[in-house]
Image (cartoon, rainbow, N blue to C red):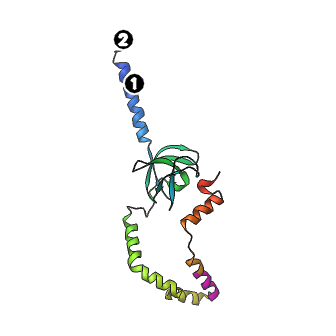
Amino acid sequence: MKRPSRLAAPLVTLLLLNLCLLTSVALAETVFVQSKTAKLRSGKTSLDSVVADLKFGESLEVLGKEGNWLEVQTARGAKGWIFAGKTTPTKPAGGEDDVLAKLGKSFRRTEAEDVTASAGARGLDKVSEGYANRVGITQQHRDAIDRMAAYRISDQEVEDFLKQGRLGEYAQ
């Protein structure tokens, strides 16, 4: 019967170690910020300090998972925790490097700004006004729509609402 070579055991150990390292690299998961505002936190609660403010569409490498929280690292090297509901496994449209989104933003900043402002000042545009007249939408309803369209909610108001209602990352 042949005796195993002295190099066989270290070689097998080295191969197994390489396999483990390759498997962990292959299992590395990337997620993207899908929320307009997201915070990278030092811990797994909304009360932990903020490590970084994250941008919509920003990629994050998942380091670990605990409950509804992901431990992640940004491309800039910042590490922390994010509520899983603020991420998506697929890159959302409209991120920083989305060419179509950039084009749309530049268009809105230039040509559409004056049109939008003047349309808002005079109420419905001509096409919408014609439709409203044809289907019999009352002036009272048109005024209500104009009031709703003019109402703006700040990011801070949304954040406060989530905190008070214990929703999203603030759920317990």
Does residue 138 belong to the magenta stretch?
yes
Picture layout, residue 111 above or below residue 46: below
Query: Which kind of residue does numbered mark 2 sit on?
Result: Arg
Task: Tell me the quarter of the image containing the N terminus.
Answer: top left
Q: Residue 136's quadrant in the figure?
A: bottom right
Residue sitting farthest toward the top: 1
Between 3 and 106, which is closer to the camera in this rendering?
A: 106
Does residue 29 belong to the magenta stretch?
no
Picture layout, residue 18 above or below residue 136: above
- The residue located at (58%, 90%) in the rendering is 133
Q: How would you classify the magenta stretch by its main secondary structure?
A: helix
- What's drawn in magenta, residue-wise? 137-146
- The residue located at (51%, 55%) in the rendering is 39
The residue carrying pointer 2 sits among few (fewer than 14), some (14 to 19) or many (20 or more) residues within 10 Å by Cα, namely: few
Quick one: label 2 or label 1, which is nearer the N terminus?
Answer: 2
Between 63 and 125, which is closer to the camera in this rendering?
A: 63
Label 1, on which residue?
A: 13
- The residue located at (61%, 60%) in the rendering is 162
Q: Position of residue 130 (x, y in %)?
A: 53, 89
Between 84 and 152, which is closer to the camera in this rendering?
A: 152
Task: Answer whether residue 138 is visible to the viewer in this image.
Answer: no
Residue sitting farthest toward the front: 49
Q: Position of residue 4 (x, y in %)?
A: 36, 14
- The residue located at (37%, 21%) in the rendering is 10
Query: Which kind of residue does numbered mark 1 sit on?
Result: Thr
Label 2, on which residue?
A: 3
Q: Which mark is residue 1?
A: none
